[in-house]
Image: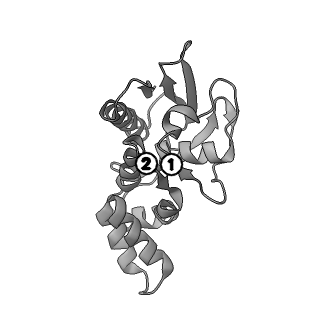
């Protein structure tokens, strides 16, 4: 069960190292069709007394999250997409049996399944962990193009052997007609976070 322990006393480097370890475990779980299926991905805020946990229940196929804090979710995103604030890392996730709001759910889905699928999105989330805000609208073209980009890169979306890279997205963008808005938005996102 991947777990990310964070504390208000953790510096950005410690938070990043813990996040990278949890994300690596999530990737290994899906890559190898891990058991049990589903499993939980936990964010544990150890500075709270008692410590509090946000838990995502994830399938071992395509990083599919089916519930947050034992509340079944629909895998979709807030509209409009929120800005992921650096302060969200420690303070805004639902804990215990509390249901996630649309914005919280979106941030959690970008933080784990989308970042597990994409090293570019992972880089953006690490930017948040390091203390800078990220507008998720910048990353949405990468999320929307995941299946097409994975297909072009010959990455199995159900059990990927690796996350998509900036080069994968650039190669996919190159297949889109010049002047297509998504082409430029993909290039912009990769330039900013790749």
**Left or right: where 38 falls relative to 187:** right
Residue name at image x 56 percent, y 20 percent:
52
Residue 153 shows up from this direction: no
Residue name at image x 48 percent, y 75 percent:
182
User: Is 112 above or below relative to 10?
Assistant: below
Image position, residue 192 (x, y; %): 35, 63
Instruction: Name the colour scheme.
Output: one colour
- Neighbour class for label 1 at 10 Å: few (<14), some, many (≥20)? many
Query: Residue 25, located in which quarter of the rendered image?
Result: top left
- Neighbour class for label 2 at 10 Å: few (<14), some, many (≥20)? many
User: Tag 1's secondary structure?
Assistant: helix
Q: Residue farthest to the top? A: 50
Disc 1 target residue: 110
Evaluate if marks 1 and 2 touch, with contact meaning CB atoms under 8 Å apart: yes
Marked residue nearer the N-terminal end (1 or 2): 1
Query: Residue 67, located in which quarter of the rendered image?
Result: top right
The disc placed on residue 37 is none
**Left or right: where 83 falls relative to 132:** right
User: Tag 2's secondary structure?
Assistant: helix
Quadrant, the C terminus: bottom left
Residue name at image x 43 percent, y 48 percent:
115
**Left or right: where 188 falls relative to 76:** left
Image position, residue 96 (x, y; %): 65, 23
User: Is 151 above or below relative to 52?
Assistant: below
The CA span between labels 1 and 2 is 6 Å
Image position, residue 167 (x, y; %): 29, 65
The disc placed on residue 115 is 2
Q: Nearer the viewer, residue 3 or 26?
A: 3
Q: Residue farthest to the bottom? A: 178
Image position, residue 46 (x, y; %): 47, 19
Residue 91 shows up from this direction: yes
């Amino acid at each position: 069960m991947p777990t990310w322990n964070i504390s208000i006393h953790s510096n950005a480097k410690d938070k990043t190292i813990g996040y990278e370890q949890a994300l690596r475990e999530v990737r290994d779980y899906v890559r190898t069709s891990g058991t049990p299926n589903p499993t939980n991905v936990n964010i544990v805020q150890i500075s709270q007394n008692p410590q509090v946990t946000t838990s995502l229940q994830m399938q071992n196929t395509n990083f599919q999250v089916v519930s947050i804090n034992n509340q079944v979710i629909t895998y979709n995103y807030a509209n409009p997409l929120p800005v992921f604030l650096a302060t969200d890392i420690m303070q805004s996730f639902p804990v215990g049996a509390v249901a996630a709001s649309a914005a919280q759910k979106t941030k959690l889905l970008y933080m784990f399944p989308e970042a597990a699928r994409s090293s570019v999105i992972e880089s953006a989330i690490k930017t948040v962990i390091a203390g800078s805000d990220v507008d998720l609208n910048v990353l949405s073209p990468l999320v929307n193009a995941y299946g097409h980009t994975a297909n072009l890169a010959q990455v199995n979306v159900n059990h990927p052997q690796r996350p998509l890279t900036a080069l994968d997205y650039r190669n996919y963008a190159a297949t889109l007609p010049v002047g297509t808005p998504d082409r430029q938005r993909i290039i912009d996102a990769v330039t900013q976070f790749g």
